Image (cartoon, rainbow, N blue to C red):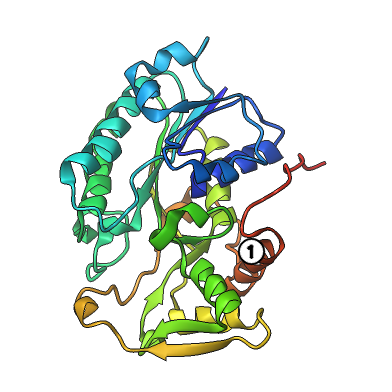
Amino acid sequence: MFLVTGGAGFIGSNLVRGLNARGIDDILIVDDLEHGDKHRSLNSLEFTDLVDYRKFGDDPARYFAKAPEAIFHQGACSDTTEKNGRFMLSVNYEYSKLLLEYAQGRCPFIYASSAAVYGDGDDGFVEAPRCEWPLNVYGFSKQLFDRYVRRMLPRSRSQIVGLRYFNVYGPQENHKGRMASVVLKFHEQATSHGGLKIFEGSERFLRDFVFVDDVVAVNLHFLDTPGVSGIFNCGSGEARSFTELARLTVAHYDGAVIVEIPFPDDLKGKYQAYTCADLTHLRASGFTRPMTSLADGVAAYVKVLKDSGGYYRRPVRPSA
């Protein structure tokens, strides 16, 4: 059995789908369905059971007759505007430590970190403490666990891999609301009033946009490479502007236009100008697959948005 925490979430549900594509359906999903609409991300997935993360955390061992084949820990509070540090550390740090301790000597532990640990990025985007300066408690919670992992790695009894996700976009992120990718917001704007809104000066704001299929491929790469541990960036390795992203998206909507709006005063001096994953460490691990181009990723995502509202409505079939 495989364990996927956050399996009803954006990246987690895509990862379950990726496992399904390999013919794997013996999967235990651990998540929080307090917001019931998240069930839509599960409708087309094949899995064995679903358990609330609070109940699971009380005693993980009770859910397995034998050790799981791997733990993919994707569950977290990912709201970068959350101010409650006690809650953030409980959910993102303490819970992660609990799962890691359970995995020790039992199975690989592959978890979601975040590029938020780099903060404004002024010190670069290399997986090293010198580059880390989180700007919010979400980023701090991820940095704190990465530090814990670094201390454990020399004495670890099983594989540990942390993946620092950059700006991930793709199907099954509808439930994220304001934290969803700009592509989903562009789609909603294009289909409601036809105007894709971007801030004035968006050509100067560049991000590393990575398609969710690539993120799944990186996770599965480390599942297939059990001798490799460490913390790795997970992005496209390219920085593209919001203006470019808007142009690539608007091309898929007849009559839609790009509309520039004034840059908000409350974001001045607080808006990240640039992110770009350094993929040197990831490539050295043996992951050689090219990342999806932004044009191809946007086209694939927009098709799902138009066809089925952003959700996969049919189970994926194992490849021949």
The answer to whether 41 appears left or right of 119 in the picture is right
Reply above or below: 266 against 114.
below
Q: Which residue is found at the position 42% from the left and 90% from the top? A: 260
Residue located farthest toward the right when viewing the structure as drawn:
320
Q: At which x and y percent is residue 157?
A: 37, 22
Q: Quadrant of the N terminus?
A: top right
| Nearest the eye: 11 or 104 | 11
Reply above or below: 141 against 61.
below
The residue tagged 1 is: 305
Q: Residues within 10 Å of mark 1 (few under 14, many from 20)?
A: many
Identify which amino acid the numbered label 1 is placed on.
Answer: Leu
Residue 157 seen in the figure:
no
Residue 179 seen in the figure:
yes
Q: Which residue is found at the position 57% from the left and 78% from the top? A: 190
Q: Which residue is found at the position 67% from the left and 61% from the top? A: 304
Q: At which x and y percent is residue 284?
A: 47, 52
Q: Which residue is found at the position 30% from the left and 77% from the top? A: 273
